[in-house]
Amino acid sequence: MTDIALEPLPNPGDEGTCPFDLPSALAKWREEEPVRRISVESGGSAWLVTRHEDVRTALGDHRLSADRNRPGFPHLRADEPPMPPGTFAQYDPPEHTRIRRMLTKAFMPKNVEKLKSLIRETVDELLDAMERQPQPADLYRDFALRLPTLTMCGLLGVPYDDRAVFQENTQAILNLGLPGAEVTAAYERMLAYIGELLDAKGLAPQDDLVSELAVERVATGELTKVEAIGVIALLLISGHDTTATSISLGTIALLREPDRLRRLLAEPDTVPGAVEELLRYLPGLHTGVRRIATADLEIGGVTIRAGEGVIMALNAANRDPRVHDRADRLDFDRDRVGRSSLAWGHGIHKCLGQSLARAQLQIALPALFERFPGLRLAVPFEEIDFRDKALFFSVHKLPVAW
């Protein structure tokens, strides 16, 4: 592909518009050129896919590889560091299948169901602590980030007192504005910590996932220690940051829709559907799902050649009017039968922890507004410190009062 005058992937809010709105360029491309070439951060170009049907099809196509080590992969940085071994989200079958299968049980809905009482207790304790502190409070730091951090620490067996190790390094790893060398250093710090934890769990196992990996997978030779460390790092990073993001942005969205919020609190049975709609509506993974073609294929009538990069724009697909009526509006009455959101992805790489994330969101959001019925932003919406130069669109902080 030639790369003359190609436009880059737009970010939420780039045009001075509301960051919850789909960038106008994405909406235009989806209607006029749903599979088009764009420039990529690592140099060169890739195909951008924006329509729901095409994105869903592409996510399920085995000819599109997640392997970032393949030449021509559309990286997010010009100096993208290699992913640690064991980062199975970047693997293709059979290696992806081998590792993911080892983790499936822990995240199955029936096992997540057992965690709900603990999640409720944690939510209540965090809200108690917020209630006692001065206003304004930072909802991101004091609630949205702490809940999934505590949940993942409990599930994995990571001491909560060590949270700074993975929280701070996660922020560096996801920060697209940092040079690759700093990202590599953050990975090295996190992996060194996890290696020590894995050794300790192997000597004195407990009832947690890291102990299970140490005893049942590493000690038996099913996983190498290096692979296990990478697996745990991926779970820690994705397991707390994405849920913290969804709680924060979900809170903002609900505060901007007071009628829908009142109904949500008055009709608890609408909560699960409301959470799915929020995830469809919010920017989320605004950098797209990235793959590289291992063989020639066709997407949306366009031929993709082997060795060409492909980026699936989930935010554009989730706002596709062919699938969702009034797609740019938040609508808790939306008919979701046969009209699935792609917020969790699709295919073999669909989010492993979706049931756990759902449980936390379904419990946390209603509880927050029930405890603080007068909850409001402590700064104008335009002054919120959004985290827009990162893998996941989020906030740096979220000042609130009540």
Image (spheres, rainbow, N blue to C red):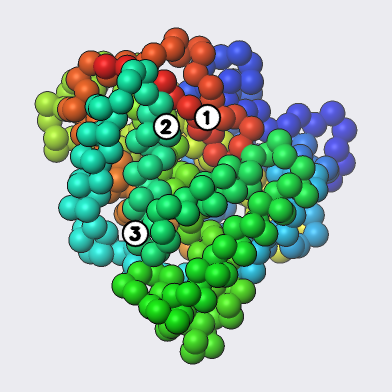
Q: Residue under circle 2? A: 140
Specify the quadrant of the image occupied by residue 176.
top right
Disc 1 residue crowd, few under 14, some 14–19, many 20+, Cα 10 Å: some
Residue 44 appears left or right of 381: right
Query: Residue at 58% across / 66% down in the picture?
Result: 230
Q: Type of residue at label 1?
A: His
Please tell me which residue lies in front, 22 or 242: 242
Residue 346, position as x, y percentages in the image: 46, 54
Q: Type of residue at label 2?
A: Tyr
Residue 256, position as x, y percentages in the image: 35, 16
Q: Residue under circle 3? A: 154
Residue 284, position as x, y percentages in the image: 49, 37
Please tell me which residue lies in front, 359 or 56: 359
Q: Compared to 217, does 338 lie above or below?
A: above
Specify the quadrant of the image occupied by residue 247.
top left
Quadrant containing the N terminus is top right
Q: Compared to 74, does 94 lie above or below?
A: below
Do callouts 1 and 2 mark residues in contact (Cβ within 8 Å)?
Answer: yes
Query: Residue at 14% across / 38% down in the picture?
Result: 269
Q: CA distance from mark 1 to mark 2?
A: 8 Å
Query: Residue at 47% across / 44% down in the picture?
Result: 241
Q: Residue under circle 1? A: 396
- Confirm whether residue 96 shows in the render: no
Label located before the other in sequence (1 or 3): 3
